[in-house]
Image (cartoon, helix red, strand yellow):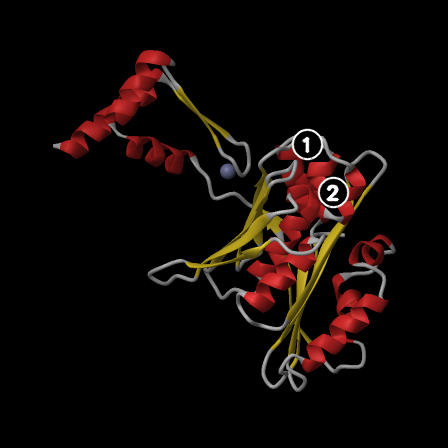
Amino acid sequence: MKDYLVRAIAKEAGIRGLACVTTGLANEIADRHDANPAARAVLAHVLTAGALMGALLKVQQRVAVKLEGNGPLGRAIVEADSYGRVRGYTAVSQPQLDVTIATQKPVQAIGNEGVLTVVKDLRLKELYEGYVPLHGETVGEALTYYLNQSEQIPSVVATGVRLDENGRILVAGGLLLQSMPPDDGRLLHQLADQLQELPPVDALLAEGKTPENILKLAFGEVDYKVLEERPLEFHCTCSRERTEQALISLGRTEIEALLANEGQAVVNCHFCHEEYTFSREDLEVILALIEANEE
Ligand SMILES: [Zn+2]
């Protein structure tokens, strides 16, 4: 199954629904980070959460979801945009961590104590930022808590990940239901209770259910309409030009030090592990650019 997300709406009831499958992009990103099975599982949960949050945005907006804590994984970050492009990483890619815990209780892998932060670029003057303490055992529970407490929108989120016998992601995906007027949260809570009776998302995906099937199960008796199906994909915004700009912004002293010591600069993107190498000649050009800017 290709990675994609389905958006649906129950207009009269006032519930928005999103469901997605993220198996391919999660494996691709985890491969880039050489993640072990435990890190791979946590990363897949967080990437799925990011894809769902991205789908709540309007055109050209971006979101970052960051989970940080005192556990073996330390930190997981995902960025997503309104076009279904996702990137992310974990602070540690080879943690000493039980794979079952990472798969079923990923928040524990990040920490018993910690913070979930959401930063949104809504194309306004300032970034929107909200945060809550890490809550629950699953990324779905943590994000549900954030949406209800910080954004105060009745919501329920579930993400599911299952690994195969080689420690690769067999299935990853998620579901998000959110209240819109006229629902005041009452119907949403009923649907959330019904979700408890259903098999978890990873079990549904593993038995071949599609995001459309999952939405149908989640909405139950409620009338809804599918609005859109859109692809999801790994995409990193880094480039050689951006990296060069970053080097220029380091300033003359730093570049002179790089030239004197390493004789080159190797810059590694946190998000995708792409490596950008700037030779002595490249650095001399950068130095000349900095000097020209200073005049
Ligand atoms: Zn990158």
On the rendered structure, is 201 left or right of 260? right
Going 49% across and 34% down the picture, which residue do you hit? 269
Query: Is residue 4 at all visible to an observer of this figure?
Result: no
Left or right placement of residue 62 versus residue 147 in this view: left
For the point 69% across and 81% down, which residue is it? 186
Q: Quadrant of residue 16?
A: bottom right
Ligand 1 within 8 Å of disc 2? The answer is: no
Q: Position of residue 83 (x, y in %)?
A: 54, 58
The dot on residue 95 is: 1
Identified at 81% across, 56% down, the residue is 205
Which quadrant is home to the C terminus?
Answer: top left
Residue that protrudes farthest toward the left in the picture: 295
Which numbered tag is attached to residue 119?
A: none
Residue 293 on image: x %, y %: 18, 34
Proximity of marks 2 and 1: CB atoms separated by less than 8 Å? yes
Circle 1 sits in a helix, a strand or a loop, which is it?
A: loop
- Going by the numbered disc 1, the residue's amino acid type is Pro
Taking the view exactly as shown, the residue that stands out farthest to the right is 207
What amino acid is labelled 2 in the image? Ala
Give the side of residue 204 with respect to residue 135, left or right. right
Query: Distance between the Cα atoms at labels 2 and 1?
Result: 10 Å
Residue 107 coordinates in the image, percent (x, y): 68, 48
Pointer 1 local density, CA inside 10 Å: few below 14, some 14–19, many at least 20: some
Q: Residues within 10 Å of mark 2 (few under 14, many from 20)?
A: many
Which numbered marker is on residue 102?
A: 2
Q: Which of marks 1 and 2 precedes in the sequence?
A: 1
The vertical placement of 22 against 197, above or below, is above
Query: Which element type, helix, strand or loop, lies under badge 2?
Result: helix
User: For this rendering, which residue is in front, 84 or 126?
Assistant: 126
Looking at the image, residue 155 lies above or below residue 110: below
User: Is 244 above or below relative to 120?
Assistant: above
Tell me which corner region of the image, top left, top right, bottom left or bottom right, holds residue 29.
top right
